[in-house]
């Protein structure tokens, strides 16, 4: 992805985040009833990919006390950058470190995995994905 397209996508994400319609969908109209960093990260990641027209789901993971891989947060990898509603990160390490600081979580051995975690309890709502992707697209 070109630098120009990345800047444009970052601005679109920020525009959507500040749009009352975005919050109405997440908090009032979806089954998730939460924001992009407290439960709706999968919905938001899928929305970014849909608005951008391409991308791959990525997630921050950790090993829990039972030695299971646990998904903590979803984002979108597009053109080598990782996006969530905090903007883009140039690489996996930057994204994980930003998440740790922003969410005040410091689990050891956090890393990035690709794709959807079929065992995760992070909620999804396809109708909300469609609505939010359209809000992001308004700013592209």
Image (tube, rainbow, N blue to C red):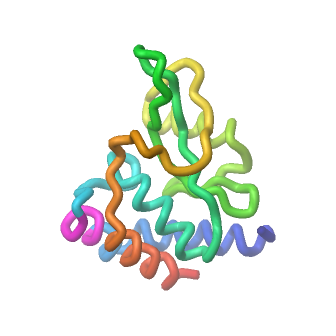
Going by the picture, which residue comes out furthest to the front? 118
Relative to 68, is 34 above or below? below
Q: Which residues are magenta?
A: 24-30
Give residue 113's position: percent from left, percent from top.
60, 40
* For residue 27, side relative to residue 51 (left or right): left
What is the quadrant of the N terminus in the image?
A: bottom right
**Camera-side residue: 68 or 94?**
68
- Does 135 lie within the magenta span? no
Residue at (45, 31) in percent of width and height: 70
Name which quarter of the figure residue 128 lies in: bottom left
Relative to 55, is 58 above or below? above
Going by the picture, which residue comes out furthest to the right? 2
| Secondary structure character of the magenta stretch overall | helix
Name which quarter of the figure residue 88 lies in: bottom right
Residue at (53, 55) in percent of width and height: 84
Relative to 29, is 104 above or below? above
Residue at (61, 66) in percent of width and height: 10
Residue at (68, 41) in percent of width and height: 92
**Camera-side residue: 118 or 1?**
118
* For residue 108, side relative to residue 119 (left or right): right
Q: Tally the numbered discs.
A: 0
Give residue 137's position: percent from left, percent from top.
52, 81
Relative to 15, is 66 above or below? above
What is the quadrant of the C terminus in the image?
A: bottom right
- Does 29 lie within the magenta span? yes
Give residue 82's position: percent from left, percent from top.
64, 53
Give residue 20's position: percent from left, percent from top.
31, 73
């Amino acid at each position: 992805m070109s630098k120009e397209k990345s800047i444009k996508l970052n601005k679109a994400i920020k525009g959507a985040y500040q749009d009352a319609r975005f919050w109405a969908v997440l908090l009032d109209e979806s089954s998730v009833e939460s924001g992009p960093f407290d439960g709706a990260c999968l919905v938001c990641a899928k929305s970014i990919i849909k608005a951008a027209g391409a991308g791959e789901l990525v997630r921050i993971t950790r090993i829990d006390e039972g030695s299971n891989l646990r998904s903590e947060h979803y984002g979108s990898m597009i053109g080598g950058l990782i996006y969530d509603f905090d903007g883009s990160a140039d690489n996996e390490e930057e994204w994980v470190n930003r998440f740790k600081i922003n969410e005040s979580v410091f689990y050891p051995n956090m890393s990035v995995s690709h794709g959807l975690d079929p065992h995760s309890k992070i909620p999804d709502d396809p109708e909300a994905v469609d609505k939010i992707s359209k809000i992001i697209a308004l700013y592209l």
